[in-house]
Image (cartoon, helix red, strand yellow):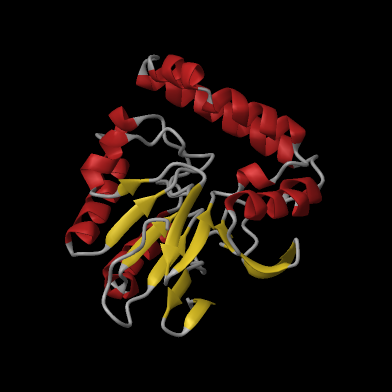
Amino acid sequence: MPPAEAGGAGAQTLFISDLHLSPAAPAVTRRFGEFLAGPARAAAALYILGDLFDYWAGDDDLDDPFNARIAAALAEFAAAGVAVHFLPGNRDFLVGPGFAAATGLTLLAEPCVRAIAGTPVLLLHGDTLCTDDADYQAFRAQVRAPAWRAAFLARPLAERKALIAELRARSESEKQVKPAAIMDANAGAVAAALRVHGVATLIHGHTHRQGSHAHDVDGRACRRWVLGDWGADRASVLACGPDGWHFLAT
C-alpha cells in the first residue's frame, strides 16, 4: 500500500499546481499567501504538483528576497501542522533538498503514488503526458538527465538565470506556433500511466485546463483530475475529504 496521509476526521487533502509565482505577479503571490493563511490551515495535507515558481535557478537562490518570502510563508504554514508535499514541475524541477529544509516540506519524486482517503492515487506534474509534443519531450529528457543538472548547477547563479530567461523566451515563442492539441495530455499516455501504476485515480497539472475526466482503461473506470493554473482572479484547488473529490470555489 502506498504512503497514506494522517489527519483527523473531516480533514481534507488539498492539491494545487501552476501558480508560477514571481515578483512580476504580485496578485497571485498575495492570493497564495491568503490561501496558506486561510482555508488551507484546516487541511491534513497540501500537495503542490509543480510550477509553484515561474522558474527556479537552484537552491542557492534562496537568499533572493522574493524566494525567501515564499519559503518563509511555507515554513510557517508547515510549522502550523499541515503536511506539505512538493512534486517539482517543468519550471521548478531544480528545487532540491535545500529548499525542502528551508520550508519544512517533503520532496516527492515523479511518478508518485500516495494513498489519499484510502485510495491509491497517481500524482504527476503532467508534462510527461503531453507526448504529442515530441520536441518538448526531447528537451525534457535532456534537462532532467543527472549529468545536465549537475553541470547546470555548477554554473554561476547569474549565468543560470540568464540562460533560464533565454530558454523561457524561446519556449513562449514556440508556443505561439504549436497546435494547442499537442500541448494537452495524450489519451494513450494517460491510459498507460494508469495501467502501469495499477490505479484508478490520477491528478496532474501543467496543461492549465482544470477539469475532471472519465477514462476506461482495460474495462476499469478511472478518473483524471486536472489542476488549473492560478491568476489574479482564480485559484485552482482540488480537495479530497469526507464529501468526496471536488474543486473548491475560489
For the question of whether residue 64 can be seen, the reply is no
User: Where residue 62 sits: x, y (%)?
Assistant: 27, 35
Q: Quadrant of residue 198?
A: bottom right
Q: How many badges with numbers are in the image? A: 0
* Residue in the foreground of this view, choosing between 134 and 115: 115
Residue at x 57%, y 55% (from the top left corner): 205
Q: Is residue 125 above or below residue 177?
A: below
Residue at x 71%, y 54% (from the top left corner): 191
Q: Quadrant of residue 10?
A: bottom left
User: Where residue 11 sits: x, y (%)?
Assistant: 32, 77
Please state if 63 lies on the left or on the right of 170 as rendered: left
* Residue in the foreground of this view, choosing between 181 and 109: 109
User: Where residue 169 sits: x, y (%)?
Assistant: 61, 32
Q: Is residue 169 above or below residue 41?
A: above
For the question of whether residue 44 can be seen, the reply is yes
Which residue of the protein is positioned furthest toward the bottom in this rendering?
Answer: 243
Please state if 126 lies on the left or on the right of 149 as rendered: right
Q: Quadrant of the N terminus?
A: bottom left
User: Where residue 4 sits: x, y (%)?
Assistant: 36, 62
Residue at x 28%, y 67% (from the top left corner): 6
* Residue in the foreground of this view, choosing between 26 and 239: 239
Please state if 233 lies on the left or on the right of 34 as rendered: right
Please state if 6 lies on the left or on the right of 108 as rendered: left
